[in-house]
Image: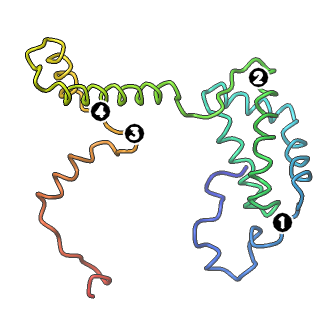
Amino acid sequence: MATAFDRPIPGQSLTTEPRNNPWEQPPQMSSVEDVTKYYIERLANQEVLDDFAAICEAGVAISPIVEATYMQGVSRGLHTIDAGILVAPILHTFLKQAIESMGVTVKDDSIDYEKKAEGKELNRFMLLASKYLDDNANNMGDPGVQMLSELVNEDEPMMEDEPMGMEDDMGDMENEAVEEPMGLMARG
């Protein structure tokens, strides 16, 4: 049984004789139809579907299963990465329908869209509230403005693309002494 560690590591092809690995050879299947037929025949096995259903029942999304399936074919030299990417939606649909017909709920991917939407809405609220406070800075005696000011200043939102804790890391970096590089490459 193949594991994640059976795949080629980055740079491996540079340490062996050229054209020695399966992925460096011309693919065994050149058309998308052949690749689709190959995978559908393999996935239509009830034992395979039972195993994939058990994995999906444990909470694994179907997208990584499909990607791992076609990437294994690429690393074995069965087809090109392009053919795998083109076949992926077909495999996704086939597996999803087959597993759902067994009564198992299938997640398409592992992204929590509801949580992502809530975060965006919170950021939008904070930005609009900040703008409102800037426009009404002279009304700080108003209880509503005070409450909004407390909310905005207490819960500084993090932008979606901003890594968590970035401000703290930057502050720590400024206070730390810069260490001199060591080793062979530090000689200059």
Q: Mark 4 points at which residue?
A: 157
Q: Regarding mark 3 in the picture, which secondary structure is present there?
A: loop
The amino acid marked with disc number 3 is Glu
The amino acid marked with disc number 2 is Glu
On-image quarter of the C terminus? bottom left
Q: Name the residue under label 2.
A: 100
User: Which mark is first along the chain, 2 or 3?
Assistant: 2
User: Which mark is first along the chain, 1 or 3?
Assistant: 1
Identify which residue is drawn at 89% across, 58% down.
Answer: 31
Q: Residues within 10 Å of mark 3 (few under 14, many from 20)?
A: few
Q: Name the residue under label 1.
A: 27
Where residue 158 is drawn, which disc sits there? none
Residue 112 in the image: state x and y as whole percent: 52, 29
Instruction: Determine the CA span between mark 2 and mark 1.
Output: 33 Å
Quadrant in the picture for residue 134: top left
Q: Residues within 10 Å of mark 4 (few under 14, many from 20)?
A: some
